Amino acid sequence: MKKTLLTLFLSVVLSPLLHSQSLGFSYFFPVNGYFSNPIAPLKLSIPVTFGDYFEISPGVALYSIGGMGMTDLNEGYENSRPLVGPFHSFNATIVPTIVIPSGTFRYDLHAGIFAFHTFNTKLLTGNFEQMILKKENFQALSSDLKLDSRGWGWGFLYGLTVKFKITGKIWGKMGCDYYSGSQEMPVSGSYYASSFDKPLQKYYLNHPDARLDYRGFNVNIGVVLKK
């Protein structure tokens, strides 16, 4: 799967080099997570314009994500810490954009959808154990937990990009987007735990509705190459 996604990513990057495109650096700051950066580090989008005031930008990016939180855990479990990571994420976006030109500047207001596929996914076992210790009031714990990463996730994004002319056909750009999405990611397994008033025992854990909390701010800096 990883080789297939890398091949797809490289083919998308290389094929449109002779056409109008946006290419740049893109960094992701997850909510309740660890800083993440692109593998290349590149993010590519190919704007399709409809007049001077509207465009649609399909795009792809491949991220190395340090850690993200989870939602829809069983009742009583707080989820304010990263629980999944590190892992890789292949992202694809489709973003309709309203363009506001102003001399040598232009302002892009956009909102769209994104889909992502995670691979090499791992559970941050230490953080998960700390969450269990806090909820159950144990003093010691050792776990054997399994994370089930299921297919693709998706969500919505919106943001603002400011572009400025460098030369006749080259524009610089700076922007920020907010991503809000999720992916099914149940957690199950067992653990041994003890406390001052309870002897060492084996417990079973199952979070069938748990989801990866794919939320955060994406900051990007790059150039737009026009025809």
Image (tube, rainbow, N blue to C red):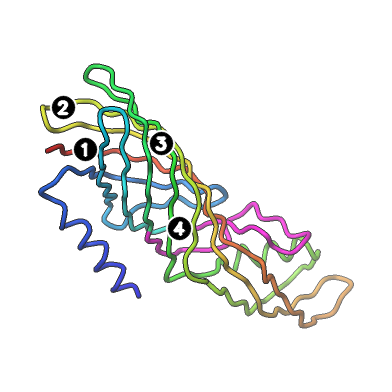
Count of number-bearing discs: 4
Residue 89 sits inside the magenta stretch: yes
- The residue tagged 3 is 110
Find residue 42 and name its label.
Answer: none
Measured Cα–Cα span from mark 1 to mark 4: 26 Å
Q: Are marks 3 and 1 in contact (CB under 8 Å)?
A: no
Query: What percent of the width, then of the height, locates residue 22?
Result: 23, 42
Residue 115, compared with residue 198, is above or below; it is above
Query: What percent of the width, then of the height, locates residue 52?
Result: 26, 28
N-terminal label among 3 and 4:
4
Residue 179, compared with residue 107, is above or below; it is below
Q: Secondary structure at mark 1?
A: strand
N-terminal label among 3 and 1:
3
- The residue tagged 2 is 166
In front of the other: label 4 or label 2?
Answer: 2
Q: Residue at x 22, y 62 (%)?
A: 10
Q: Which residues are magenta?
A: 66-90
N-terminal label among 2 and 3:
3
Measured Cα–Cα span from mark 3 to mark 1: 17 Å
Quarter of the picture containing the C terminus is top left
N-terminal label among 4 and 2:
4
Find residue 223 and name its label.
Answer: 1
Query: What percent of the width, then of the height, locates residue 114?
Result: 43, 52
- The residue tagged 4 is 66
Query: What percent of the width, then of the height, locates residue 41?
Result: 28, 52
